[in-house]
């Protein structure tokens, strides 16, 4: 591709200047009314067809270079004429007729270029076709037909560039399409963000899909020009999203999330289609995580009842869990420890802002315990701690215990806050709130013993015992003070049953430990003699 550019770039530049001069001449003739509209269209088609037949005559003489220059220029002139017909207020051709005509011309160009291997023909034709709307100056009311016009040319060029592996055609089409979009966004100065954002999104999706398919077809392991072009495509979409939405005072968090999720999905396809090559897929994953992080840092304009803190925390959690998953996949301990540190920092951040998250009614109820945004966020953070604790149990038991203990502390705080919120939301006076909190601590101790029995870590037996003893002291010396009532009796029964459950778990745990010790003990002398 580089050799081709070195050989023909001056020729291409000269043709571009000549085509621009011709287009400007037509534009002046049209604007000054030198000819009637019908004569203008007829002259445009006439010149284009003449150049096409001139090119064909050179093709019969086997002079392919001259043939492609003349035929490509002729196609460009016809595209310019279609642009005039589409964007002129004097002729009023139906848009569907114009789009069908452009579709037919593009199909003809792609078929001939593909069948006859005429690389220069389609390059010059598509370049002229994409530059024509810029030179002809469409009106703001023509934005939809302009979008359809550019989309048809783009799809045709992408198809041939992928089928024939002509990378320079793909790159040129991308640059020209971006130029058309940028020119007309500035020229149209839209009053709403919806249409320009839709056009930018469509451009991003079309090229991302085309580049992935091209990499698969060319078997380049998703590296080189295709990877570079996909990254430029994403950066341009991010830029346009920020610029467009910022002009209308709208947060750009959503488009960043769109690109981030797109990169995550693309990484899976890239990994599978590249023969499970880690490198290109890892680039897309890392970029997706960076976009999630940027989105999280700019979520504040979406503040509703403190939900911006929930969304920010969840977005950062995606970054943390994504980094952890990558670290295990590529076996990078450094990245794994970074994800651990990020999780701890995220817990600290969430602890400082969680109290500002307000209740949101669900199913007509003022507050539903454990089914509210704050509680679910705590549960997600704690689940990650339990999961990592389980994963690290064999390799790093100390680190495993630290993670599990932090996760257990989160659960304890979660129980306490949920019970307090129930009493505050519904003004419960008939039942003792301190005893209800004690019940939550007993349940928490039960969970600690269950986790300890599951992981066989003695530290959790110690931790569960401490929680049980402290809670018992709280119950007998603080919660039962004052007048006796039926609610205290009911709560004491519940606490007693839960404590018996803990005793049963602890008994089974100790019996299992005893059996394990007996299994590894060496046989005695009497047993050996027997």
Image (cartoon, rainbow, N blue to C red):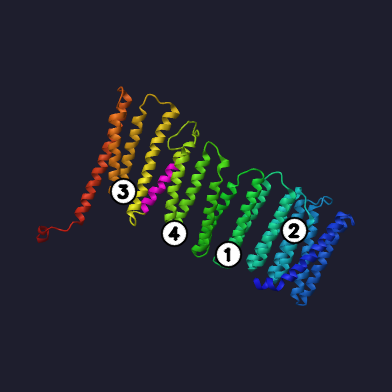
- The numbered mark at residue 102 is 2
Report the number of numbered marks. Answer: 4
- Residue closer to the observer: 246 or 514: 246
On screen, residue 483 versus residue 219, left or right, reads left
| Cα–Cα gap, marks 3 and 1 | 47 Å
State which tag comes first along the sequence, 3 or 1: 1
- Which residue is labeled 3 in the image? 454
- The numbered mark at residue 189 is none
| Cα–Cα gap, marks 4 and 2 | 49 Å
Pointer 1 with pointer 4, Cβ within 8 A: no
Q: Quadrant of the N terminus?
A: bottom right
Vertical order, 466 against 278 (above or below): above
**What secondary structure is found at the residue carrying circle 3?**
helix
Q: Quadrant of the C terminus?
A: bottom left
The residue that appears at 38% across and 41% down in the rendered structure is 411
State which tag comes first along the sequence, 1 or 4: 1
Residue 209 visible within the image: no
Per the rendered image, the range of residues in magenta is 376-391
- Which residue is labeled 1 in the image? 215
List x then y, in percent, for residue 71.
77, 68
| Cα–Cα gap, marks 4 and 3 | 26 Å
- Which residue is labeled 4 in the image? 329
| Cα–Cα gap, marks 1 and 4 | 23 Å
List x then y, in percent, for residue 473.
28, 33
Q: Nearer the viewer, mark 2 or mark 1?
A: 1
**What secondary structure is found at the residue carrying circle 1?**
helix
**What secondary structure is found at the residue carrying circle 4?**
helix
């Amino acid at each position: 591709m580089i050799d081709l550019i070195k050989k023909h770039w001056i020729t291409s530049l000269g043709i571009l200047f000549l085509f621009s001069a011709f287009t400007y001449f037509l534009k002046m003739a049209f604007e000054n009314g030198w000819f009637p509209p019908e004569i203008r269209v007829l002259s445009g088609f006439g010149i284009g067809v003449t150049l096409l037949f001139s090119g064909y005559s050179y093709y019969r003489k086997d002079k392919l270079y001259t043939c492609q220059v003349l035929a490509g220029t002729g196609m460009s002139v016809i595209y310019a004429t279609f642009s005039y017909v589409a964007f002129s207020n004097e002729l009023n051709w139906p848009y569907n007729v114009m789009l069908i005509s452009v579709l037919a011309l593009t199909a003809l160009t792609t078929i001939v270029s593909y069948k006859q291997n005429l690389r220069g023909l389609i390059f010059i034709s598509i370049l002229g076709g994409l530059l024509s709307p810029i030179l002809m100056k469409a009106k703001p009311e023509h934005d939809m037909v302009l979008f359809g016009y550019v989309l048809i040319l783009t799809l045709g060029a992408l198809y041939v560039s992928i089928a024939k592996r002509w990378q320079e055609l793909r790159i040129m089409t991308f640059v020209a399409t971006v130029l058309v979009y940028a020119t007309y966004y500035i020229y149209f100065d839209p009053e709403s963000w919806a249409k320009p954002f839709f056009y930018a999104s469509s451009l991003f999706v079309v090229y991302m899909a085309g580049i992935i398919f091209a990499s698969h077809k060319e078997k380049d392991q998703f590296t080189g020009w295709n990877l570079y072009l996909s990254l430029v495509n994403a950066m341009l979409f991010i830029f346009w999203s920020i610029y467009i939405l910022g002009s209308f005072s709208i947060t750009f968090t959503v488009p960043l999330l769109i690109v981030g999720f797109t990169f995550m999905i693309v990484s899976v396809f890239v990994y599978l289609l590249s023969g499970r090559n880690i490198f290109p897929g890892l680039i897309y994953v890392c970029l997706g995580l960076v976009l999630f992080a940027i989105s999280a840092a700019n979520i504040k304009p979406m503040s509703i009842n403190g939900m911006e803190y929930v969304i920010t925390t969840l977005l950062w959690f995606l970054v943390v869990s994504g980094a952890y998953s990558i670290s295990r996949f590529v076996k990078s301990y450094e990245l794994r420890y970074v994800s651990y540190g990020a999780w701890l920092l995220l817990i600290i951040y969430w602890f400082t802002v969680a109290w500002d998250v307000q209740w949101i009614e669900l199913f007509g109820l003022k507050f539903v315990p454990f089914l509210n945004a704050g509680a679910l966020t705590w549960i997600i953070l704690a689940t990650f701690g339990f999961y990592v604790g389980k994963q690290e149990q064999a390799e790093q038991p100390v680190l495993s215990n630290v993670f599990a203990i932090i996760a257990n502390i989160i659960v304890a705080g979660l129980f306490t806050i949920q019970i307090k919120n129930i009493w505050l939301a519904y003004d419960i006076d008939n039942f003792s709130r301190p005893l209800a909190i004690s019940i939550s601590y007993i349940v928490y101790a039960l969970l600690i013993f269950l986790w300890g029995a599951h992981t066989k870590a003695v530290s959790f037996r110690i931790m569960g015992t401490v929680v049980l003893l402290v809670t018992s002291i709280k119950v007998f010396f603080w919660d039962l003070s004052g007048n006796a009532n039926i609610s205290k009796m009911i709560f004491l029964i519940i606490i007693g049953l839960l404590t018996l459950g803990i005793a049963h778990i602890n008994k089974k745990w100790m019996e299992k430990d005893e059996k394990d010790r007996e299994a590894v003990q060496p046989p005695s002398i009497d047993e050996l003699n027997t």
